[in-house]
């Protein structure tokens, strides 16, 4: 017999073992999760050696599977669904101010409900073009105009259009994130620096002007907006439900500036609509894998989104900033943006799940160690797939449950069992030298 004082309660069955050793199962899970949370916190720090790994984890989300399973409207070429009946996006390309003024003049003939500008005219250049643009903008009944907000934690001046062109409501056009150019855009901030985002402001202006009744989510967002804009800085954010990539090939809601200035264009189609103006490159009609290629080279106003062809290792951005604004407008108009469930609940689920699994895992670890690895790996694989799919289903129903803590905990709990086993045996050995007994489910010969 070994030197330790063994407790063989595991051999009496899992049920009896759990009833008599539930406290140790809880302690075991508590110790493991203290380590797991410590590792998670460690990766949240900005240590440079960990930055590549941290960036890789941040850029990947299991919910991206949703966009692979449920392909957005732009891939359904046989069943072309309008991106948003109330929304038209007009590409201004590289037009100067006089050219934009001509486009707005034609748009004004159609009497749109809201004219939204995802562009900033901050330089005092082209006097003639500025005068023409000012005249065109003054004719527009309702304008929401963008500015670039300071992204710090203080109320500060951003980059606005020159004073002469500051007409209508002002809203920031920043896309969220410390490095939006190189990271995946997944969420939007409705308010920041005592102002409202362009897309949120545009959508609510339209809903108010048309007298549309707000649904529950829209009401909550409006209440939050009215409350949060009293602050200089807000951390509130909402996950974007990307539902299409606007394209003149797959959707007639996108209009190029050359189409607007064409003599055959009928401005009446814009009557009572939202018209969003922004830069979307120079359109190319080439196709790649059946999808329209917007332009041949990477553009400074293109971003990574979950719609990217590659779930990992993204190297080519897939969506223009104005398209992202259009998706946010669509979300707010429908009230179908994704609400993020706090990560605290993910960790609670992970802890409870591992607590339930502990008796079974420890039973095989102690009594059937020859089968432990195969049972553990199969269980890890099965549960990881299940909770990833649960996350996708929850996402499809308008909520985002972060499955990473659950999957990571399931994976690490098995390896941490070895450390806990060694620790228990070390303590038991020390106590045995002091002629003291120690009871533990791990103190069984295997």
Image (spheres, rainbow, N blue to C red):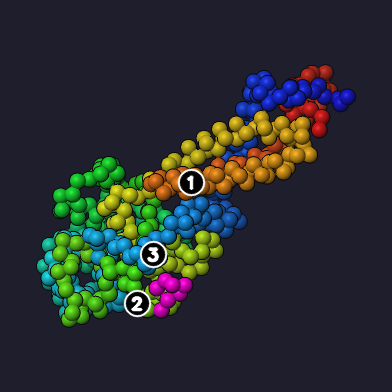
Please, what secondary structure does the residue beneath circle 1 have?
Answer: helix
380 on left or right of 387: right
- Evaluate if marks 3 and 1 touch, with contact meaning CB atoms under 8 Å apart: no
Q: Nearer the viewer, residue 59 or 153?
A: 59
The numbered disc on residue 283 is 2
The N terminus sits in image quarter: top right
- Evaluate if marks 1 and 2 touch, with contact meaning CB atoms under 8 Å apart: no
Q: Quadrant of residue 257?
A: bottom left
Q: Nearer the viewer, mark 1 or mark 2?
A: 1
Disc 2 and disc 3: Cα gap in Å?
20 Å
The C terminus sits in image quarter: top right
Q: Which residues are magenta?
A: 286-292
Q: Say which label, 2 or 3, has the lower sequence index.
A: 3
59 over 368 or under it: above or below: below
- Could you tell me which residue is drawn at 68 percent across and 21 percent down? 16
Disc 3 and disc 1: Cα gap in Å?
24 Å
Q: Quadrant of residue 110?
A: bottom left
The numbered disc on residue 391 is 1
Please, what secondary structure does the residue beneath circle 3 have?
Answer: loop
């Amino acid at each position: 017999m070994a030197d330790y004082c063994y407790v063989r309660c595991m051999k009496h069955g899992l049920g009896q073992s759990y009833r008599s050793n539930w406290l140790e199962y809880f302690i075991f899970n508590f110790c493991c999760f203290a380590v797991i949370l410590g590792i998670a916190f460690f990766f949240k720090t900005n240590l440079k050696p960990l930055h590549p790994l941290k960036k890789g984890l941040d850029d990947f989300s299991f919910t991206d599977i949703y966009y692979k399973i449920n392909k957005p409207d732009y891939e359904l070429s046989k069943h072309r669904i309008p991106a948003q009946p109330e929304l038209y996006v007009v590409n201004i390309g590289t037009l100067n101010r006089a050219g934009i003024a001509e486009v707005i003049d034609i748009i004004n003939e159609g009497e749109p409900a809201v004219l939204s500008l995802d562009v900033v005219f901050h330089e005092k250049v082209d006097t003639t073009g500025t005068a023409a643009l000012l005249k065109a903008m003054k004719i527009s009944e309702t304008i929401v105009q963008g500015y670039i907000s300071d992204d710090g934690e203080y109320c500060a001046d951003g980059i606005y259009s020159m004073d002469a062109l500051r007409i209508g409501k002002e809203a920031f056009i920043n896309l969220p994130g410390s490095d939006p150019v190189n990271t995946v855009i997944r969420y939007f901030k409705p308010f920041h620096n005592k102002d409202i985002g362009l897309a949120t402001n545009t959508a609510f202006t339209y809903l108010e002007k048309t007298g549309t009744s707000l649904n529950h989510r829209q009401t909550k967002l409006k209440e939050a907006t009215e409350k949060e804009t009293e602050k200089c800085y807000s951390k509130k954010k909402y996950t974007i439900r990307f539902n299409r990539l606007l394209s003149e090939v797959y959707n007639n809601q996108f209009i190029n500036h050359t189409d607007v200035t064409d003599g055959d264009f009928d401005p009446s189609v814009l009557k009572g609509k939202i018209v969003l103006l922004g830069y979307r490159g120079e359109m190319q009609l080439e196709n790649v894998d059946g999808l329209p290629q917007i332009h041949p080279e990477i553009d400074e106003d293109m971003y990574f989104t979950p719609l990217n062809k590659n779930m990992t290792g993204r190297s080519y951005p897939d969506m223009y900033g104005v398209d992202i604004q259009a998706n946010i407008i669509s979300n707010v108009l429908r009230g179908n943006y994704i609400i993020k469930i706090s990560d605290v609940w993910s960790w609670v689920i992970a802890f409870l799940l591992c607590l339930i699994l502990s008796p079974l895992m420890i039973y095989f670890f102690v009594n059937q160690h020859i089968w432990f690895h195969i049972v553990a790996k199969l269980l890890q694989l099965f549960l990881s797939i299940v909770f990833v799919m649960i996350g996708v289903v929850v996402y499809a129903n308008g909520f985002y449950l972060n499955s990473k803590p659950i999957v990571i905990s399931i994976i690490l709990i098995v390896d941490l069992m070895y450390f806990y086993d060694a620790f228990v045996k070390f303590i038991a050995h020390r106590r045995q030298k002091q002629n003291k007994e120690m009871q533990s489910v791990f103190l069984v010969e295997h």
